[in-house]
Amino acid sequence: MTPVLVINSGSSSFKYQLVDVENERALASGLVERIGEETGVATHTVFLGGEATSVTATKATSRIERSIPDHTTGFAVMLEAFAAQGPSLENARPVAVGHRVVQGGARFFEPTLVTPLVEINIDELSSLAPLHNPGALQGIRAARAAFADVPHVAVFDTAFHQTMPAEAYTYAIDREMAEKHRIRKYGFHGTSHKFVSEAAAAFLGRPVTELSQIVLHLGNGASATAIRGGESVDTSMGLTPLEGLVMGTRSGDIDPSVLGVLARREDMTPGELDSFLNKKSGLLGLAGASDMRDIDTRRRDGDAAAQLAFDVYIHRLRAYIGAYLAQLGGADVISFTAGVGENSAVVRAAALETFGFAGVRLDAERNASGGRGIRVISTDDSPVTVLVVPTDEELEIARQAHAVAAA
């Protein structure tokens, strides 16, 4: 057994998972939330048998409510859960702790052993990810105090996209201003895009270096990435996770002049504009619901707003697929992943409906059949293989953290 503890920390919560990288299975997972509120909540799940994502898995879940004033207390609560519910960290002591960090800027190209200097850099990069990096840093500091004798590794969402060429990541604004404020496309969901593209190649029995792929990570947050030879060459998210596809609560691409119009006519501050585009837009803004399942149910019941929201979502998705087919000169594989990508047959069918000219032939029965694990949903004679690939960001972070710690 080779346990690695994976931490995904935010400003008022953190998720964790204990992963055995030797067998590539989750041993336990949990969520500590409402940190700093009057009453915090902590849940802890132990996987007793089978894969964590499998229908055959058996599990035991506990839940407590108590005061959790800060992340340090939250980690103490997590350790108490492991001691009380298992698995025992005495017997499954982590060989490394992997931390998800959203923004690594142009400084971090790979998973990095956490040092005081790395912490300073993560803090300095908070201006590029004010909603994410400060929480990640709190989690890192609390975890390093709780596991002082274990290597800690930061795994950055942006790292996979550092292979993008300059023409893909450069915005057409004043060069000196862009350099001064580090304004460029960074991309996100990199851990997922890396995992899915490599899993797709392994499933097909082909070297990832030989494939041109488009990976569509469609969840509440959504992004598309063009991958050539295992390297990201373009991605839909930009300076922040706001750019690109229509998402649950985020607008995705929008004319920047809209912000000036709203600022003048609604007297909105920069903070209010940021909140408007990130938290009150997307599917929620269009139809009042951020979950694609709700949108699909309502549109089938004749709800015009839900139908428009679905159509806008698909229109934007097709635009990016088409753009990346052009950038790659065609694709060998298109993979759908994350909550919507893995579970919505109607989204997958609509997204690819117009790409027959590019060699995309979806098998309607395979697409509708569902199932678990990686599966092919294109026809046997389709020049482009279309896959559903369940993502596992925690496993990918655990793999990377273990590789750095073992080096």
Image (tube, rainbow, N blue to C red):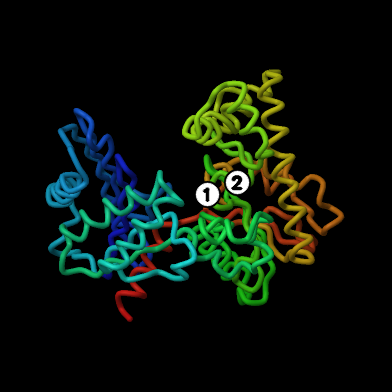
Whether 51 is drawn above or below 317: the answer is below
Q: Work out which residue is located at the far right of the displayed protein and give it.
A: 357
Q: Amino acid at mark 1?
A: Thr
Whether 395 is drawn above or below 406: the answer is above
Residue 281, position in %: x, y?
57, 31
Q: Quadrant of residue 210?
A: bottom right
Q: Which mark is residue 240?
A: 1
Q: Amino acid at mark 2?
A: Glu
Q: How many marks?
A: 2
Q: State the SS at label 2.
A: loop
Contact, mark 1 vs mark 2 (Cβ under 8 Å)? yes
Q: Would residue 346 be visible to someone looking at this image?
A: no
Side of 240 where 344 appears, left or right: right
- At x 64% / y 60%, what residue is drawn? 170
Side of 144 where 26 appears, left or right: right
Distance of mark 1 from mark 2, alpha carbons?
A: 7 Å
Q: State the SS at label 1.
A: loop
Q: Which mark is residue 120?
A: none
- At x 17% / y 62%, what residue is drawn? 147
Q: Which residue is mark 2?
A: 243
- Classify the position of the N terminus by image quarter: bottom left
Q: Would residue 219 be visible to someone looking at this image?
A: yes
Density class for disc 2 (Cα within 10 Å; few <14, some 14-19, many ≥20) is many
- At x 64% / y 67%, what residue is drawn? 166
Residue 387, position in %: x, y?
64, 56
Density class for disc 1 (Cα within 10 Å; few <14, some 14-19, many ≥20) is some
